Image (spheres, coloured by chain):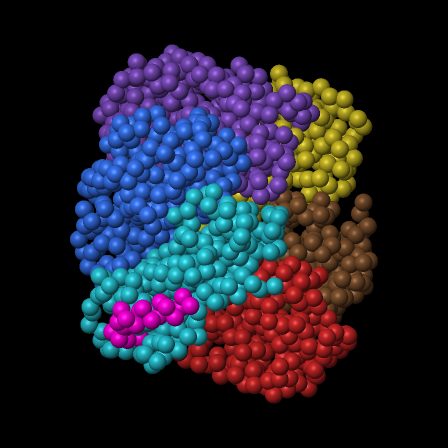
Chain colours: A yellow, B purple, C blue, D cyan, E red, F brown
Amino acid sequence: MLLQLSTWPEVESYLQHSPGIIFPIGSTEQHGPNGLIGTDAICAEAIAKGVGESTQTLVGPTLNVGMALHHTAFPGSISLRPSTLIAVIQDYLKPLVRYGFTRFFFINGHGGNVATLKAAFAEAYAYLAEANLPRADQVRCRVANWYLCREVYQLAKDLYGDQEGSHATPSEVALTQYVYPDHIKQAQLDPAVAPSGHPIYGATDFRQHYPDGRMGSNPGLATPEHGRQFYETAVKSLSRSYLEFLAES
Amino acid sequence: MLLQLSTWPEVESYLQHSPGIIFPIGSTEQHGPNGLIGTDAICAEAIAKGVGESTQTLVGPTLNVGMALHHTAFPGSISLRPSTLIAVIQDYLKPLVRYGFTRFFFINGHGGNVATLKAAFAEAYAYLAEANLPRADQVRCRVANWYLCREVYQLAKDLYGDQEGSHATPSEVALTQYVYPDHIKQAQLDPAVAPSGHPIYGATDFRQHYPDGRMGSNPGLATPEHGRQFYETAVKSLSRSYLEFLAES
Amino acid sequence: MLLQLSTWPEVESYLQHSPGIIFPIGSTEQHGPNGLIGTDAICAEAIAKGVGESTQTLVGPTLNVGMALHHTAFPGSISLRPSTLIAVIQDYLKPLVRYGFTRFFFINGHGGNVATLKAAFAEAYAYLAEANLPRADQVRCRVANWYLCREVYQLAKDLYGDQEGSHATPSEVALTQYVYPDHIKQAQLDPAVAPSGHPIYGATDFRQHYPDGRMGSNPGLATPEHGRQFYETAVKSLSRSYLEFLAES
Amino acid sequence: MLLQLSTWPEVESYLQHSPGIIFPIGSTEQHGPNGLIGTDAICAEAIAKGVGESTQTLVGPTLNVGMALHHTAFPGSISLRPSTLIAVIQDYLKPLVRYGFTRFFFINGHGGNVATLKAAFAEAYAYLAEANLPRADQVRCRVANWYLCREVYQLAKDLYGDQEGSHATPSEVALTQYVYPDHIKQAQLDPAVAPSGHPIYGATDFRQHYPDGRMGSNPGLATPEHGRQFYETAVKSLSRSYLEFLAES
Amino acid sequence: MLLQLSTWPEVESYLQHSPGIIFPIGSTEQHGPNGLIGTDAICAEAIAKGVGESTQTLVGPTLNVGMALHHTAFPGSISLRPSTLIAVIQDYLKPLVRYGFTRFFFINGHGGNVATLKAAFAEAYAYLAEANLPRADQVRCRVANWYLCREVYQLAKDLYGDQEGSHATPSEVALTQYVYPDHIKQAQLDPAVAPSGHPIYGATDFRQHYPDGRMGSNPGLATPEHGRQFYETAVKSLSRSYLEFLAES
Amino acid sequence: MLLQLSTWPEVESYLQHSPGIIFPIGSTEQHGPNGLIGTDAICAEAIAKGVGESTQTLVGPTLNVGMALHHTAFPGSISLRPSTLIAVIQDYLKPLVRYGFTRFFFINGHGGNVATLKAAFAEAYAYLAEANLPRADQVRCRVANWYLCREVYQLAKDLYGDQEGSHATPSEVALTQYVYPDHIKQAQLDPAVAPSGHPIYGATDFRQHYPDGRMGSNPGLATPEHGRQFYETAVKSLSRSYLEFLAES
């Protein structure tokens, strides 16, 4: 059930039996020579829709732009500042909590979002309490990174070993190939496996150390069929996580 | 050409021949008993993709949540505060201007966004100049409301006359029916034409005066075939507008 | 009745019979070679005082500086950023709502203020509700542009036709001449009618396209006697608007 | 020379021979049973115009609303938050520094503004440097409190002794009587001299300790003739201060 | 009793008999050729601990970095912007007021903090009321500058006369020598007494006028024994001030 | 070498041979029935001083208050909002980068700081670049959590096994006992090992699930001698980390 494809009376009904909502959050950032700029949003959205279907849960619109300041030396990357994303999350939560939502499950496709999301949740809990919303004390937010699900991680290791890397990975590229089989890009990957190991600082430093945008990965290994496996594994794993989140005391 | 489905080297190439980018911006807000909550984003996104194709222009990810604070007494509506949206627009523009983009065309599906977008453009122009970006003085932003295109407006008048109204209109509902024919909602519309004429203030006041969310409209008149006409009319009209925007001295 | 010339017990008494207050809002910005930098504030203030007298309404102090970032390539122009003006409006409203004011009528002299004011009203309604002020849900703000009153617009058309233009117009210049007959400026206007038609972007772009600051206008046509007519027409028209605003259900 | 009554070419000329501008800043706040709510702005504006005339200096529009949060338990008082006023000052300075102004002299009528103004100046100096404005390092701001000029202070002591008090003082009330002789208010002052000595905290606490708004003052002693003396004394004293400020190495 | 060395149950007990807490606030800024960068924090912290002991009052952690933007042309100086410090103070107060603290006594070692602290207190009082905290109306904050205590001031005058100056003073240097006898710095002070009299503007201007960082002072006069006297005098004086603050009606 | 105990000429000299500075960051928050509220700051500060000595590195003043909003249902806890901490970090970095510092090593004692610090670093890198600071692109920040050093973690496991827990742990309590042997608190710990496993949401929820503040820990196992071991292990491990950070290409 997608919020965007629902009417407000349908949401009102939904709230009779569930206080939970899922938000996909991605990023709009370079993913190496052959990865799509929307990779993180595409993956998060596809998996969130799958989890929504399997758990009968409302799925909100995708947060397409996340915290990717370190990628902004590569054309096409866009980012919110952390303080902007904190404000955005607060704005999302305020009306939803007033309607009765208290469980927010963010299915995330981008490692760079995690820190800011956690900061945003903390700031939101405190603000909701200050604004004296009735259910403020019951609000719970969770960020669930699809690529860190144990089974997903294992699958990536089995398929790619060390060539999975940590950005523009074959696993995420595979998933976008599964979702958008007509947009599989060919690119000369030189070297086959990108450099790795340098920590993330500012945008210019990032590009100096990761000149084509990849971090230790070989996305040339990706196939749409792998993507299907990642999709199904992630949906299964995160559906279970979501239900546990909802059932938490 | 969609930014989300492009690679960064493709964006780099694109910038060799065009400084323009299109962003669809919608809203996540109630659209009456049978209108989709994502109506404004769905319409803006569909039309933006059409304009992008017809003009060979890069289309960025959809801004799904806009300024809809006045709708937040209806479950499911989400809004950014104006000051948050101003920050978001600034964040989007900063890296894009650094890459070389200077023409930003926002195809908008929600009247409530217009004021804040205009404010955001003004604040962004000033900030970009303070941050000493090379092309700051050449940056131009435009908000293009598909529903106000002369030909679209005329079509709505021809098809619905006074029953077009100003929110949850048959024209926008028709367009969503064309885009999502499997998500056409049935609802008892009582009365057939909703109340109208009360100005927009806060969320509670809005709901008191517009109890089912519609403003002077009869979305029961919408058909997917109408939606196709609106789509084609809007794409044609806004493609022309975009090219004029790009060609402006 | 001017707030600045009242005592607090007088305001307390006033609130017994009216929840309304009028705020003039102008701008401090270039108005071409012979227009006063304070034109928008002078016009708004004069008309607001007239409306206040004719409707027995409290008139607050003039907001002299508005949103005029696009004029800031001309010496003497000052502007608030939109996000600052949003904060200012929120600050004004908070105590006034606590005292019992719920109807805020902004008589505006500057087109560039409108978008930001509308954004500010939306943000204020939401914040007042979050701060749990007793009458937050009843607060209503209105921006009334004196130059767009139907009768004013018609008068300008009758007097100046196409030479009215859209900035540094003969109508507003005339009004300042009526209010400040000792400060009528002479200036060579070359050409008699300024360029027009270029949209408003950033400050540098504005000055490039409107080199002397005027937009399509010939303020050389202005006379103090015209100014008197504009004043009287606007006061009459906005007095009616204000009373309708107050009487709204 | 008033900025509001000047044209932009006149400002351009002015900058050829002076980098200085004067801003009156007041407040919109209760001034006891018979003091005008606009007292601080009225006094600051009148004196600033006088100083402007005697020193041939440009005088900007009056900042009518200052930092008066502690007065907001009395109907009619309005205040900016300190952080808003800091933003306002920064916004004022940015374009003016770009035009060539580097000496900002704020003639102030309200003690509550001083701390925030000083904080605002510090924040503005730093921001202007970060925005790389050409003359950022030469910018100097000064707050000049008319009521603290040595000669003014002496005059108040001579005329009123201990009954001058510290808010809604006979000296400031006298000055408003001189400026607005038609708006002299009569009020029963009970007791003749208000309580004094309690420090300023929040708005509710303030009203509890100063129930009619006065602080240790007897504004019943004010006369328009006193007002004239205060006006002339302050203009003379601050004109000298301004010229010294301008001449500082 | 130090907050940092207490447990939460001890704080809970403390609140049974006192609503007061002391915060030392200093600065991290240059103090001339031989003054410690932490001088203001060291002095404030030492004295606050003394006052806490003598009055049985809880002492919170030291605010080590204050508002010192004008010192930031000298290596090692750090500063918060005023608007940041305002946010910090608000954040400190919110939970403490919720626990039951209503008397906040800031023992301050840096003149540059005073304006921003006063602004911060005003903003905090207002915000606490908006957030509807139970005791918001009873909250009182006080800034107590140890160097301005009458007895301290007299002692400095007796010991140093005109060579006390106003920054990097022998009195504060002496106090740090008493607290950190192993960190007494030797430096050639040339001239013995630094320049004085230039007002404080931005950082670059400050360094131009005060090239070694001192303002009218001769810190070469300082001795640890003087420091002991300043310490004892200040503790005695501020203990009395704190108790009066607590006893205020 | 402590910044607080240095003079500005000493800092100037230091910068000739090193661009690095260490900041201890802790928190002011409940640490269970017998843990000190300042635990995280005490640990971070002690270790930072040790690392500073062993590596000849400048150590800045301790950030005593961090992001601990989830602890604010326990008396005595204080927290910055994440957005405030982001502003604080930006303020710290701006002048230091201007002086020549480019390597910032935050020795952290509180898990709740990590997300916000990472967000703050990202926002700071971007802002420094916008402010056009000379070395903006070379700035690198690192958060180093002493309790997560491999050798420290192993020691805690060896000493306490499962009773280490994740908040108010015996390891951190031991370290404070080593640093402040005179402030060892006795408290009945009931149960000996606190509950664990519940995720962290808002403050009220936290206290409901962790009624005495501990999370899965038994701080009754702590001894000052353990503390010494933790101290030495952490200093050794983080000294190595710091030097590697400095040597990074």
Residue shown at the point (53%, 14%) measured from the top left: B54
x and y percentages locating residue D92 in the rendered image: 48, 50
For the N terminus of chain C, give its image quadrant.
Answer: bottom left
Viewer-nearest residue: A246 or D227: D227
Q: Quadrant of residue A71?
A: top right
Q: Seen in the image, is E199 located left or right of residue D146? A: right
Q: Quadrant of residue F13?
A: bottom right
Residue A208 visible? The answer is: yes
Viewer-nearest residue: F207 or D177: D177
x and y percentages locating residue F63 in the rendered image: 63, 61
Position above or below: E227 against C90: below
User: Is residue D226 covered in magenta?
Assistant: yes
Q: Seen in the image, is F189 located left or right of residue F43? A: left
Q: Seen in the image, is A63 located left or right of residue B18? A: left
x and y percentages locating residue D96 in the rendered image: 51, 49
Viewer-nearest residue: F224 or A171: A171
Residue A227 visible? The answer is: no
For the C terminus of chain C, give its image quadrant.
Answer: top left
Viewer-nearest residue: E150 or E25: E150
Instruction: Specify start and end residues of the magenta stretch as a single range.
Output: D217-236
Residue shown at the point (37%, 68%) measured from the top left: D232
x and y percentages locating residue A110 in the rendered image: 62, 36
User: Is residue D1 covered in magenta?
Assistant: no
Magenta: main secondary structure equals helix
Position above or below: D206 against A34: below
Position above or below: F107 against D10: below
Position above or below: C150 against F60: above
Residue shown at the point (72%, 66%) measured from the top left: F8
Report the residue that reaches farthest toward the bottom.
E158
Residue shown at the point (38%, 22%) measured from the top left: B147
